[in-house]
Amino acid sequence: MIKLFRLLITSFLTVLFFISCNSSTEKKENKKDPENINSKVDNSPRVTGIGGIFFLSVNPETTTSWYKDNLGLVMDDYGSAFEFRNANRPNEINYLRWSISNKEEYYKPSKKGFMINYRVQNIEAMVDNLKKNGVTVLDSITTYPYGKFVHLLDPEGNKIELWEPIDSFLTEMGGPTTK
């Protein structure tokens, strides 16, 4: 469990590092006119980033406090919302949810105490493709004001959550974020 916890933390910190990299390090040929960024929109069903990291804890309150007090995460009732900018639309704020829970049933049928949420586009077509490829899709797509969700299993039995976000809803809702 400690090794898994260390692996999750290392993975989480690596993701944060890449998210926070300074855009001034871009190569000159990658700089685009903001007005033309969306001129070639790719709507193919695919993962576009990490949407959340969720893991099991025996004592989520103590663990959450530890992260707040020692690592400076800004917390709300659901953990910490990390705010970042969309690479293709820099004026758009996107979010990554980090959360601890003691609800084992949330991670089932996986036997692991964690779940990764992937940000996706075109979730309906992605689920159709996954089913055609024989992937175990655990439920139907569920829609909320902040996006669409579905759960599946990878070949190792790890539960995965796919999220087609509506970040503007979360931005309008407001609240504390870790930046």
Image (cartoon, rainbow, N blue to C red):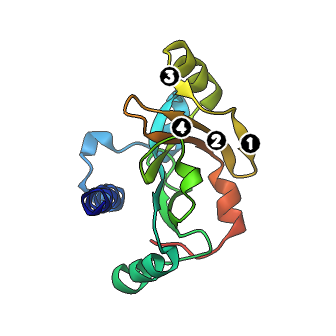
Q: Which residue is mark 2?
A: 149
46 w.r.t. 62: above or below: above
Structural crowding at the residue carrying mark 2, measured as other residues with C-alpha within 10 Å and reported as few (<14), some (14–19) or many (≥20) = many
- The image quarter containing residue 154 is top left
Tell me the kind of residue under disc 4.
Val
* C-alpha distance separating marks 3 and 1: 21 Å
Structural crowding at the residue carrying mark 4, measured as other residues with C-alpha within 10 Å and reported as few (<14), some (14–19) or many (≥20) = many
Tell me the kind of residue under disc 1.
Thr
Which residue is at a point 52% across and 49% down the rendered structure image? 107
Residue 143: mark in rendering: 1
Q: Name which of mark 3 and mark 2 comes first in the sequence.
A: 3
Assess whether mark 2 and mark 3 are in contact (beta carbons under 8 angstroms). no
Q: Which is more foreground, mark 3 or mark 1?
A: 3
The quarter of the image holding the C terminus is bottom left
* C-alpha distance separating marks 2 and 4: 10 Å
Secondary-structure class at tag 1 = strand
